[in-house]
Image (cartoon, rainbow, N blue to C red):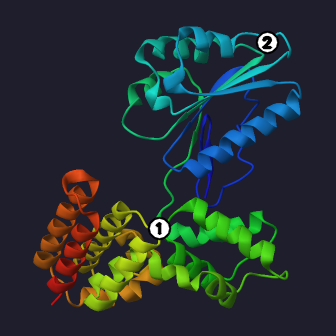
Amino acid sequence: MAYLLSTKMSVSAGMLCCVAASRSPLGRLVLISGPEALLADRAVEALRQQMRSEAPDVEVSEIEAARLDSGKLAEITSPSLFSSSRAAVITELEHLPPELDADLVDLASAQLPDLAVIVVHRGVPKGKALLEKLKSTGIEVIECPAVKPWELPQFVSAEAKRAGSSIDAGAAAALVDALGHDLRALSAAVAQLVSDGEGGPIKLDQVRRYFGGRSEVTSFAVADAALAGRTGSAMEQLRWALATGVAPVLITSALASGIRGLGKLITAGSGQRDSDLAREVGVPPWKLKSMRSQARGWDQGSLAAALKAVAVADADVKGAADDAAFALERAVLSVSRLRH
C-alpha cells in the first residue's frame, strides 16, 4: 500500500519499515509529513541508516523546531569540524518560528552536497504555508497518513512479517479489537507475541491468552456496550477503564466515532459488498456484524441526540467540569438509554 510518484512517497500500513528516500538524503531537504508518529519515526530512522551507509562518519543533529533560532539553525547546518557530512533532523516543524521560514526554504533550494536536512511535520493545519513553500522547491515528501480502521489488521500482519513471523487473519483482527487503533501498542503487542511464541504463525488463541482481558478496558469496548444498549455492562467497563488508566478523552472519542459510524451505516445504500460498505463507514469489515446489531435500535434523531450528549461530555473532560468520571457516566447512560 505504498506508491512513489517522482518526489512523493506515501507510507501506510503495507510499508512500515525500510522506508528510504528515492535517492540519497545528502545534498537536499526531505520532508516527512503526516499524523502517524510511528511511521514518521521509522521514516527518519530509515533515512539515518541510508546516510550512514553512504557516509559512516555523518554527524547528525536532532532538534525540535520550536527551540531553533537563526544562530542554532546555522550551527546545525554548517560544515562540521569532525565529519565530512552533516545532517539536521528538525521535528515538529509546525512550531518553527516564522522568521526562520525563509532560511529553511533557502536551505531546500541550496542543495549543499554534504548536508542533509530532514524536517518532520505532524500533518496539522499549522505550518501548512511553509510546507507549500518547501514543496515548491521540488523537495521529496514522504507522507505518513493516518492508517484507516480497516487497514489495521493489515498493519498487524505487516508488523508480524517485519518481526520474522506471520499472524492469522482472525488473530490480527482480535488483536485490533483488544487494543484499539494505537499503532505503537499494536506494534509492541506483535513483538511480544513473536518473542514469547514458539515459532510459526501467531494464532487466535495466543492473542486471547495474552490480550483477551485488555478488551475489557478499551474505550471502544465501552462505546460498543453503550451503543448496544447494554447499560450495566457499559457502566462496569467504563469504571474499570478509568481505574486502569484509560484517558477520559479516549472514551468520548470512541463514543463519538461509534455514533458517527452508525450514522453512516444506517444511511448507506443497500446492496454494497461488505468491503465497500466498511470503507464507506470507516471500520474493518469484521466490525460490520456487531454494528448492524447495534444499528437496529437507532435512527438519525436518536443518534443526533447521542452525539450531542457526547459532545457535552467531551467538553467536560477537557476542562469544562471538575469531575470527568461523572461526566463520562452521564454520557454513557444517556447514549445507552437513547437506543430504542
Q: Quadrant of residue 129?
A: top left
Q: Position of residue 241 (x, y in %)?
A: 42, 75
Residue found 19% across the figure and 57% down from its top: 321
Residue found 17% across the figure and 62% down from its top: 312
Residue type at numbered disc 1: Pro
Q: Nearer the viewer, residue 169 or 331?
A: 331
CB within 8 Å, label 1 to label 2 = no
Which residue has dot 2 on it?
80
Task: Give the CA separation, mark 1 to mark 2.
Answer: 45 Å
User: Is disc 2 placed on a helix, strand or loop?
Assistant: loop
Lower sequence index among marks 1 and 2: 2
Q: Nearer the viewer, residue 166 or 81?
A: 81
Q: Position of residue 270 (x, y in %)?
A: 28, 83
Select label 1 or label 2 by which is in front.
2
In the image, residue 63 sits, relative to residue 175, either above or below, namely above
Q: Nearer the viewer, residue 147 or 70?
A: 70
Q: Residues within 10 Å of mark 2 (few under 14, many from 20)?
A: some
Determine which of the numbered discs, if any, sits on residue 181 in the image: none
- On the question of residue 230 being in view, the answer is no
| Left or right position of 82 against 91 | right
